[in-house]
Image: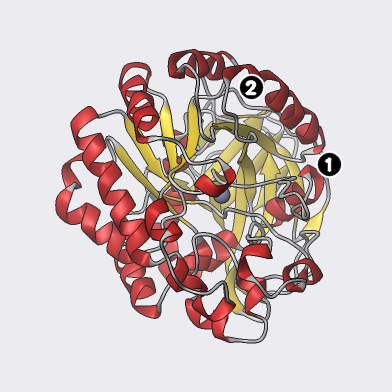
């Protein structure tokens, strides 16, 4: 006898929706059957006219991020609460940047402690700053702790977070040998440092221009073409960066190069920096021009995953300073990430929230797919329902999308067989688990 049956829904399998019943036992998917079959089950939930998808994976969130004077608004409890209303059942946060291997244990321990209150499953990426130590040793240690991904920056030399090209090469060589994934925040540091643009809101985008991303991505792609290994570009902002990759590096896309983008680069553009409340939209890399935005949409098929880069602050904190360099950078979008992208791209977006991040980030086949033996994580989605976005459940007091009308709403979210959200109400509290990805 099964514990729970999701019946009569349109179930996402092999890239399409099919009428199927899904049965769950002991937190995993036990059987997938045709709706005409009688299957003994303790409790069934009717999903007629609903889309039943694997629980979404957000591979890029910042929780409890400490920027010194300011700290992001969300802890694990509030972030995961916002996440479940958006159908996200697994997210991946970042360990604070380290420069030496000996710093790893302490920083990892700190993250594990913070994450104890998570409602959903989680993992971390190791992060390096101006890394000075042994690459092999770090990757080994990271693997031993269930983490097969290392994030680095090509910018932020002013805060000692820029990783040298020698080290990036070493990380790539190591990736080729060990299959680790190297996540890169790609912006050209020199172009940003040499920018003569004033530290003002109206000129913010020009101080970190589109070319600084495109150039850096091109430089790194040529390194990958030579060395191989696996490199994942986080938060790609420009359609022109992706066009360049399609033109010059198409043969290593999806085998050695992976691309992530975020909902805000599709919905918001740099014109907001000309407005009174522009500070509320400050983040790095910046929002781009409408031309870049259009190109980004046109190249959606090349983008592998959607991450939110969730890093919200409160209004008052964002509005404290006029100088851009003093404003905490980051916005939140965990709760509406999927609905926003679904509104633009429809069903083609589903893989970018499920199987793609699962495969790329080594969560597959535990997560990201509806098949027997996988975790019973689900989103029940009503594609017809309409909603106006409000300030949301994050502890930040605003949403960058407030007032926007969307069609398609996450109705229920299930983590390992337990309803966390049912019919848009919080019904269950589970404790998330750290998922070893290695
Ligand atoms: Zn980020």
Residue 55 appears in the rendering: no
Q: CA distance from mark 1 to mark 2?
A: 31 Å
Q: Is residue 84 left or right of residue 376?
A: right
To which residue does mark 1 refer?
Answer: 429
Q: Is residue 58 left or right of residue 361?
A: right
Number of labelled discs? Answer: 2
* Quadrant where the N terminus is found in the figure: top right
Q: Is residue 134 above or below residue 348?
A: above
Q: Is residue 402 above or below residue 123?
A: below
Q: Is residue 324 above or below residue 249?
A: below
- The numbered mark at residue 104 is 2
* SS assignment at label 1: loop
Give the x, y percent position of residue 248. Answer: 16, 51
- The numbered mark at residue 113 is none
| Picture quadrant where residue 331 is located | bottom right
* SS assignment at label 2: helix
The residue drawn where x is 35% and y is 43% is 258
Give the x, y percent position of residue 72. Answer: 74, 53
The residue drawn where x is 19% and y is 46% is 249
Query: For mark 1, does the 10 Å Cα neighbourhood hold few (<14), some (14 to 19), or many (20 or more) residues?
Result: some
The residue drawn where x is 78% and y is 54% is 69
Q: Are marks 1 and 2 in contact (CB under 8 Å)?
A: no
Color style of the picture: secondary structure
Q: Is residue 257 above or below residue 265?
A: above
Query: For mark 2, does the 10 Å Cα neighbourhood hold few (<14), some (14 to 19), or many (20 or more) residues?
Result: many
Q: Earlier in the sequence, mark 1 or mark 2?
A: 2
Camera-nearest residue between 132 and 368? 132
Give the x, y percent position of residue 414. Answer: 68, 44
Give the x, y percent position of residue 436. Answer: 59, 22
Disc number lying in front (1 or 2):
2
Q: Is residue 43 left or right of residue 189?
A: right
Residue 437 appears in the rendering: yes
């Amino acid at each position: 006898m099964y514990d729970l049956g999701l019946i009569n829904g349109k179930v996402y399998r092999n890239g399409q929706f099919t009428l199927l019943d899904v049965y769950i036992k002991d937190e995993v998917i036990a059987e997938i059957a045709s709706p005409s079959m009688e299957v003994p089950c303790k409790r069934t939930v009717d999903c007629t006219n609903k889309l039943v998808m694997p629980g979404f994976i957000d591979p890029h969130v910042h929780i409890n991020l400490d920027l010194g004077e300011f700290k992001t608004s969300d802890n694990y409890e509030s972030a995961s609460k916002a996440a479940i209303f958006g159908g996200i059942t697994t997210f991946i946060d970042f360990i604070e940047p380290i420069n030496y291997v000996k710093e790893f244990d302490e920083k990892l321990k700190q993250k594990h402690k913070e994450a104890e209150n998570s409602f959903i499953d989680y993992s971390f990426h190791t992060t390096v700053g101006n890394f000075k130590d042994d690459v092999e040793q770090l990757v080994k240690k990271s693997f031993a702790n269930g983490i097969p991904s290392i994030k680095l920056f090509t910018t932020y030399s002013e805060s000692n977070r820029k990783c040298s090209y020698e080290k990036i090469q070493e990380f790539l060589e190591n990736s080729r040998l060990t299959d680790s994934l190297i996540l890169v925040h790609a912006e050209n540091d020199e172009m940003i440092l040499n920018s003569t643009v004033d530290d003002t809101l109206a000129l913010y985008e020009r101080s970190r221009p589109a070319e600084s991303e495109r150039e850096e991505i091109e430089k790194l792609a040529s390194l990958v073409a030579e060395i191989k290994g696996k490199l994942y570009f986080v938060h790609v902002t420009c359609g022109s960066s992706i066009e360049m990759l399609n033109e010059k590096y198409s043969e290593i896309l999806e085998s050695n190069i992976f691309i992530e983008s975020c909902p805000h680069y599709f919905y918001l553009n740099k014109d907001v920096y000309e407005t009174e409340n522009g500070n509320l939209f400050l983040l790095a890399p910046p929002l781009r021009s409408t031309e870049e935005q259009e190109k980004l949409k046109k190249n959606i098929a090349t983008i592998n995953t959607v991450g939110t880069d969730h890093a919200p602050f409160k209004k008052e904190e964002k509005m404290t300073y006029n100088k851009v360099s003093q404003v905490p950078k980051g916005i939140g979008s965990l709760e509406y990430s999927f609905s926003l992208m679904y509104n633009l791209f429809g069903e083609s977006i589903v893989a970018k929230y499920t199987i793609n991040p699962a495969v790329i980030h080594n969560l597959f086949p535990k997560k990201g797919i509806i098949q027997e033996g996988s975790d019973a994580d689900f989103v029940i989605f009503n594609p017809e329902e309409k909603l106006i976005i409000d300030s949301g459940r994050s502890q930040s007091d605003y949403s960058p999308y407030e007032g926007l009308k969307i069609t398609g709403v996450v109705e229920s979210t299930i983590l390992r067989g337990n309803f966390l959200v049912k019919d848009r109400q919080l019904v269950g509290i589970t404790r998330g688990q750290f998922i070893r990805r290695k």
